[in-house]
Amino acid sequence: MKRMGLMTGLMVVLLACGCATGRRGQRGKPLLVGTNPNYPPIVFKENGLMVGVEADLAGMIAARLNRPLRFIQLEWDEQVGALLTGEVDLLMSGLTVTDVRRARMDFTDPYLQIGQMVLVRRKDEAKYADVKRLLDAEITVGVENGTTGDIVVQQKLVRSRRVQYLDIEDAALDLIRNRRIDAIVADAPAVWWLSSKHEADLVMLPYALSEEFLAWGVHRDNAALRSQINRMLDDWKREGTLRAVLKKWLPIVE
């Protein structure tokens, strides 16, 4: 009986040590964040560094988890595959929550509500004073290939012709130079950023074509990470921390 008691006690000690080691190992393991850094001010590269709303929040998440942060730069269409194969733990790339994406992965709680907005040449602003004029117009619209803006243009601007770009900044330059396109449709943060950067030439129209939410992609088998991040978001919303980060990069956020 004494031997059985000793063995049982030893097993408990070993299990406890194993659990502690597992927790320490997780804390030391890098948090691998997949991103496509072509979406200022949400996430982009500046002087070789990852910056923007999601870059700041990724750093805060990693610090809270006590894990070093490592960004994995991916092409837009590589992201979900990288998450599913375990190449990354989390996707932070200005992702809108859609049913199509939900079919392949889970999302954290949203951190920002946005819409698809329209950017036009300042001299053309009066042509599209209300959404009906825009929808009735036979114009050429620039979109970033494969994005929610691309889908919204196909669904709503049915009289328009669509031109796809790999980089929305290239579309803005074409718009300024009166080449190829008459307008751009993209997420509100991107349109606001471009209108600020090219204020003399471009203006954001005062209405949205849709309503969406930005969140982060998590593997379906990683419910623990999703729950941890959702708790962080709850804390940051309550404390005003999230709003402060958003206002730093997006002064127009309400």
Image (cartoon, grey):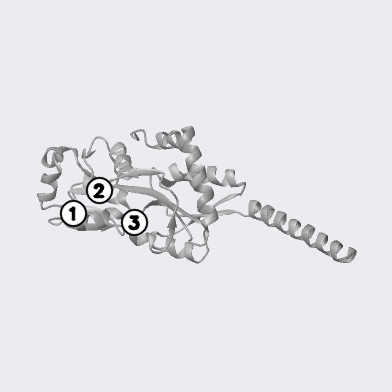
Query: Contact (CB < 8 A) between labels 1 and 2?
Result: yes
Callout 2 secondary element:
loop
Q: Residue 195 in the image: x percent, y percent?
A: 28, 39
Within 10 Å of disc 2 (Cα), the crowding (few <14, some 14-19, many 20+) is some
- Local crowd size for mark 3, using a 10 Å CA cut-off: few (<14), some (14–19), many (≥20): few
Mark 2: amino acid: Ser
At 73% across and 59% down in the image, what residue appears? Answer: 18
Amino acid beneath label 1: Lys
Residue 247 location, quadrant:
top left
Q: Which residue is mark 3?
A: 98
Q: Closer to the N terminus: mark 1 or mark 2?
A: 1
Q: Which mark is residue 156?
A: 1
Disc on the earlier residue, 3 or 2: 3
**Image quadrant of residue 148?**
bottom left
Q: Could you tell me the amino acid type at mark 3? A: Thr
User: Foreground: 87 or 195?
Assistant: 87
Q: Residues within 10 Å of mark 1 (few under 14, many from 20)?
A: few
Mark with earlier residue (1, 3): 3
Q: Residue at x 44, y 33 (%)?
A: 244
For the question of whether residue 180 can be seen, the reply is no
- Horizontal and vertical percent position of residue 218: 47, 57
Residue 102: x and y in percent read 38, 60
Looking at the rendered structure, the secondary structure element under dot 1 is helix
Q: Residue 145, relative to residue 193: is it above or below? A: below
Label at residue 210? 2
Q: Is residue 101 visible?
A: yes
Cα distance between the residues tagged 1 and 3: 17 Å
